[in-house]
Amino acid sequence: MEKNNTGDPQVGNEPEKVLYTAKIHTTGGRDGGSAISSDGNLDIKFSIPGSKGSGTNPEQVFAAGWSACFIGAMKIAAGKMKIRFPEEAAVDAEVDLCLTGEAYSLQARLNISLPGLDMAISQSLVDAAHRTCPYSKATRGNINVVINII
């Protein structure tokens, strides 16, 4: 197994093709820090969750990315299944920052709304998306994830 520069083993095989690389420069961390993308499209300030700071936090950014990616994965699955994907579809992602003893961790819930689709079709789309979404793959086996179709 290959090792990355932290010495951790890499999971899976090397990709055949890199489709996109996000480049973000972050300073200061979650308490008053900021992050900006190399193209300038993302420019955010950070603040501690629950504080009076005006910035976002890493959990919100992660939830936004995962929910957007999950919708994309469901659209791809719908296309393959020849199902009309509802324009009103939504994912309400909830990412918890947890503390057990002195160890921090995450857990998440994805609450998925697919108006106009019956439960069996909705479940098929959600299952396919959860198998293929890169965020779902990254979290699988690493954090508690609950997926609800609402």
Image: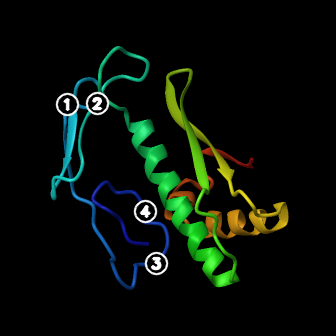
Cα–Cα gap, marks 1 and 4: 28 Å
- Looking at the figure, which quarter contains the N terminus? bottom left
Quarter of the rendering containing residue 75: bottom right
Dot 4 crowding, Cα within 10 Å, few <14, some 14–19, many 20+: few
Dot 1 crowding, Cα within 10 Å, few <14, some 14–19, many 20+: few
Secondary structure category for the residue under label 2: loop
Circle 3 is placed at which residue position?
Answer: 13
The label nearer to you, 1 versus 4, is 1
Quarter of the rendering containing residue 123: bottom right
Secondary structure category for the residue under label 4: loop
Q: Which residue is painted at 36% across and 22% down in the image?
A: 48
Cα–Cα gap, marks 1 and 3: 34 Å
**Which numbered disc covers residue 28?**
1
The label nearer to you, 2 versus 4, is 2
| Residue type beneath disc 2 | Phe
Q: Position of residue 111 (x, y in %)?
A: 66, 46
Q: How many marks?
A: 4
Q: Earlier in the sequence, mark 1 or mark 3?
A: 3
Q: Which residue is painted at 63% across and 53% down in the image?
A: 141
